Image (spheres, rainbow, N blue to C red):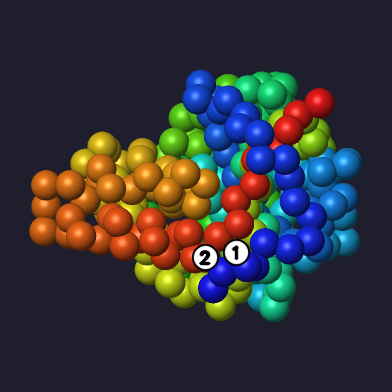
Amino acid sequence: MRGMCTGVSGDKVRHDVTDAMLLYHGTKESSLAGILVDGIRPRSPDSEGNHAGTVPELKSREGMVYLSSSGSVQYAEMAAGSGRYLILEIDSNRLKESDMLPDEDTIVHEALYLERVAPGPDYLNRYKEMLPRVDQFEHQERWKELLEGGGTVAHHGIIPPGAITRYALIEPSLAPRFLEIHSTLAFLASARKGMRHRFLALPAYIFDGNVEPLFQGNDLEQIGPRLNELRAEWLCAFQITRR
């Protein structure tokens, strides 16, 4: 599926993100032009959010932009409808640390885990009861710790355009294959490098495509080069020049 790189594009100048803690935000392609000018804005107060049809209690909180360490493809899918998925890469070192907060969802799941509440109806009821009462600001200093465990984090306020390093556009028809690949990459990354790396495998594949090391020395060695061939067919990854 070549030749899909149309519309708004960024400069192909490499931005040095070697020492950055990179996070990702998924949304719809039609938001890109505005984001590059005004940044990523929190949802409006009357927005139902991505989970309105499944867990209404998981509504995005007012004033928050939610970020992920795992590529945010699933969130882009929820927002994009039938259009292309937009994945934005954000350098968290360019954000105020005081604005970084744990995801309230992660805080509740950790509390229920520590209480040893078993999955089931009681877990779901407790979750729905606890979620609205969680104060993210009380846990602000733990945002990195909870991000590592849960893979998501909240930012209080607008993400400025200067914090966005790269973005990728993905055809929606490829989403099922992407999720399948994500499961494989996450499993291998956690087995080879530790559980925290399960979140990092998909964005590394989307933006850099270097997955061969995960497959070297095992029965899946031929998969790595093939995945990179698919990536070349599937993706438009642009680097954005900062002013």
Image spot of residue 184 (x, y percent): 30, 60
Point out the frontmost of discs 2 and 1: 2
Q: In the image shown, does 190 or 234 lie closer to the viewer?
A: 234
Q: Quadrant of the C terminus?
A: top right
Q: Dot 1 corresponds to which residue?
A: 170
- Describe residue 213's horizontal placement relative to residue 164 as left or right: left
* Residue position for label 2: 234
What residue appears at the point 25 percent right and 43 percent down from the top-left corner?
213
Residue 146 appears anywhere in the view: yes
Residue closest to the eye, 97 or 198: 198
Q: Is residue 218 above or below residue 175?
A: above
**In the shown orientation, is residue 45 left or right of residue 184?**
right
Quick one: label 2 or label 1, which is nearer the N terminus?
1
Q: Position of residue 152 (x, y in %)?
A: 55, 44
Is 132 positioned to the left or the right of 107 in the image? right
Amino acid under disc 2:
Trp
Quarter of image, res 58: bottom right
